[in-house]
Image (tube, helix red, strand yellow):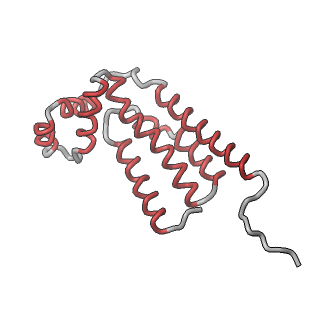
Amino acid sequence: MALPQLSIWQPGDGLRKIKYKYHVCLIVIFSVLIRLLFLTDRYLWCDEASSVLISRHSVDNLLFHAAFDVHPPLYYLLLHDWIILLGDSIAAVRSLSLLFGILTVVLVIALTRWLANERTALLAGWFAALMPMAVHYSQETRMYALMGMLTLAAALALMMWIKPPP
């Protein structure tokens, strides 16, 4: 009679985890590079300039102006502080959305890993890193990259609450 397995450890688990983390890092680095590629090639267009203009105001004035905008003020408040930290150059103001776009890729990987497996998570990460619409909105000074990131974060939080960890 054989003894039951007391451990869930399998030979090669350590190497598999290292390879998975390596691939996740590769996807994140690639998503940073592809989003930086043409970040400053275009001028700010009307809506982007509006976001910067609203965000340059003091917080009180910003909230007053945001009350007349169709978008909630969270992005403007974040951009306000971002401009204080990095300035208002095209690269600086667009880098906030770039950060949200990169975090979106990480959240896609995490959520897919939670729902499926590592291989599927890596594939979903590559799709998220390369998706033209995601890259485009990661290079705009608008709230769309933030919206995508917060939606994925909420979905991941819900899945973590409902489903036990893999």
Corner quadrant of residue 2: bottom right
Corner quadrant of residue 7: bottom right
Seen at 64% across and 39% down, the residue is 22
124 versus 29 height, above or below: below
Corner quadrant of residue 155: bottom left
Seen at 47% across and 26% down, the residue is 36
- Give how far across and how far down residue 117 sits, in percent: 63, 57
- Give how far across and how far down residue 126 sits, in percent: 58, 42
In depth, the one of 80 and 4 nearer the eye is 4
1 versus 19 height, above or below: below
Seen at 35% across and 43% down, the residue is 144
Tally of numbered discs: 0
Left or right: 4 with respect to 128? Answer: right
**Position of the N terminus by quadrant:** bottom right
- Give how far across and how far down residue 40 sits, in percent: 39, 22
Q: Outermost residue, bottom direction? A: 1
Q: Outermost residue, right direction? A: 1
Left or right: 70 with respect to 158? Answer: left
127 versus 156 height, above or below: above
Left or right: 34 with respect to 7? Answer: left
Seen at 24% across and 30% down, the residue is 52
6 versus 134 height, above or below: below
**Position of the C terminus by quadrant:** bottom right
